Image: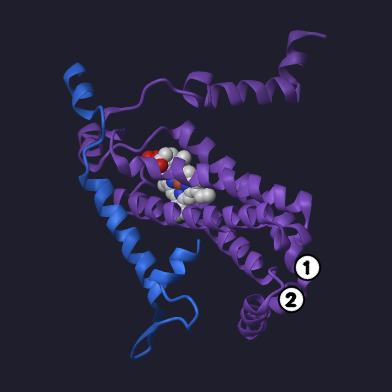
Chain colours: A blue, B purple
Amino acid sequence: MGWIGSIIPLDNLGHYLHWHFILISVSNLIVIGLMIVTFVAALLLPFPGRSRRKENQ
Amino acid sequence: MSTTEIDRQWTTRLRRRAAGKLPPEKLLPDTQPAYVSSWIYVFGVTTLAALVVVIVSGCILALEGPQWWHSSNIGHFVNSTHLWSVEIFFFAMIVHLWGKFFMGAWRGGRTLTWMTGCVTFFASILAGFTGYVSQTNFDSQWISTQSKDGINATGGGSFFNVLNLGQMLMWHIVILPIAAIALTGMHVLLVRIKGVVPPFEKDTEIAR
Ligand code: HEM
């Protein structure tokens, strides 16, 4: 797993974004972003088998 | 025993009620309405699957104990499996929650489904929190000393002492898992009893 450390610096302090009273770590912000991307993708991506079932209706 | 006596037995009454509310073909259906074929409906089951991995990996950790998970390779692996399945659990649960929120999935008498979801969410946050403060490292020391003031300010500190490692570990491995599993069971049974909520357009069609 050593290769992960060569791409992402893991030995220093966490990075934080600070804007007025909002303080959030970059890692948490990335996770929130990924959740939003997943949510939008779940709505937009076609579900396998959907068209087949429509024909049967 | 006369028939009326049998009718009055609690076993008879409970069986009839359960079978009436949740007949086997509703509990384990073979088809779903067409509108369920969308990725957004997958996240409840994803959450459920992640929860199973959380529980199984947690049980293995409990069987072997801290010396094992802190020092052996397999121990590290199961410890990481436990953490990362929790990450997937929360990730999927949030996407699930957003989906149900924008669908207004509490419609049509599904209030209890929504509410059991909310309470499960709260119980899971507590489970995550007690897990973090049970790590016996600098992280858990930091988290517990930071949070104690907040919790004590609410008065909760009188029965929930975040600096008490034994208590936090017991909450994490006994009380909260029981709560999460029971609530999730209720939640899923309620979904089966009510059936999947129809989309908004369908709902108005039915109402018309
Ligand atoms: C341990 C966490 C949870 C698990 C395992 C879980 C599991 C599920 C499953 C398997 C379903 C049916 C399939 C689906 O539509 O995705 C479902 C439906 C539902 N969930 Fe959850 N859920 C959890 C948390 C939540 C939370 C936090 C909320 C919102 C506060 C929520 C609200 C709902 C609602 C309203 C439905 C009914 C949807 C309908 O009738 O179509 N759930 N859940």
Q: Position of residue B184 (x, y in %)?
A: 56, 45
Q: Position of residue B30 (x, y in %)?
A: 41, 20
Camera-side residue of B22 and B1? B22
Camera-side residue of B148 and B118? B148
Residue B43 vs A26, above or below: the answer is above
Which residue is denoted by mark 1 in the rendering? B167
User: Within 10 angstroms of label 1, few (less than 14), some, or many (20 or more) residues?
Assistant: some
Determine if marks 2 and 1 fall on one subunit: yes
Which subunit holds the residue at mark 1?
Answer: B
Residue A17 vs B116, above or below: the answer is below
Residue A7 vs A51, above or below: the answer is below
Which subunit holds the residue at mark 2?
Answer: B
Element type at mark 1: helix
Q: Ligand 1 appears in which quadrant?
A: top left
**Residue drawn at point x = 66 percent, y = 80 percent:** B138
**Residue drawn at point x = 74 percent, y = 76 percent:** B161
**Callout 2, which amino acid?**
Asn
The answer to whether the residue labelled 2 contacts the one labelled 1, judged by CB atoms less than 8 Å apart, is yes
Residue B52, image quadrant: top right
Q: Looking at the rendering, in which quadrant would you find the N terminus of chain B?
A: top right
* Residue A36: assigned label: none
**Mark 2: is the Cβ under 8 angstroms from ligand 1?**
no
**Residue drawn at point x = 35 percent, y = 55 percent:** B98
What is the residue that sits farthest to the bottom in this orientation? Answer: A20
Which residue is denoted by mark 2 in the rendering? B161
Element type at mark 2: loop
Residue B109 in sight in this render: no
Judge left or right: residue A52 versus residue B197: left
Judge left or right: residue B83 versus residue A4: right
